Amino acid sequence: MKIEIRPAFDEAVIAAELPIRKAAAKMLKQLQGLDLNEIWGHPDLNFEKLHGMIEPTTGEQLYSLRVTGSVRVVSSLLKGPVIVLVSLHVQHDTAYRKKG
């Protein structure tokens, strides 16, 4: 799986505490070794569609990935396949709030 990292994700990881940075690095390593079907079924990643949520700049559907029990990544998918890591949310619930 190819991975694209947006600046907001990168900045949030850098600003996060060490355990979250380590968990994000572990998730990235996992993603690199999986294809899209494996990501969908991976029990640790809990990849799921965020219904009604669209990436504002690209119009792509948004998805959630689990980093830890409380930390989530908002992502999108591009053809190729490429997973785009859009943002990191240290508090689980903020990943599911619509902006606007």
Image (tube, grey):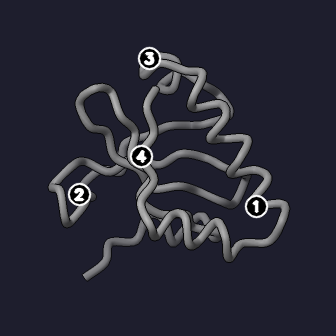
* Residue visible at 79% across and 71% down in the picture: 17
- Which residue is disc 2 drawn over? 54
- In this rendered view, identify the residue nearer to me: 94 or 21: 21
Within-10-Å neighbours for mark 4: few <14, some 14–19, many 20+: some
Q: Amino acid at mark 4?
A: Glu
Q: From the top left corner, tell me how far across and down residue 5 is, in percent.
A: 45, 53
Label drawn at residue 96: none
Residue at disc 3, secondary structure: helix
Quote the CA–CA distance across marks 1 and 2: 25 Å
Q: Which residue is mark 4?
A: 4
Image height of 41 relative to 79, above or below: above
Between the residue at mark 4 and the residue at mark 2, the CA separation in whole angstroms equals 17 Å
- Secondary structure at numbered mark 1: helix
The amino acid at mark 1 is Ile
**Position of 98 relative to 66 (above/below):** below
- Of the numbered discs 2 and 3, the one sitting upstream in the chain is 3
Sequence-first disc among 4 and 1: 4
Mark 3 vs 1, N-terminal side: 1
Q: Determine whether, in the image, residue 18 is placed left or right of residue 47.
A: right
Left or right: residue 88 compared with residue 91: left
Distance in Å between CA atoms under marks 2 and 3? 21 Å
Q: Which label sits on residue 37?
A: 3
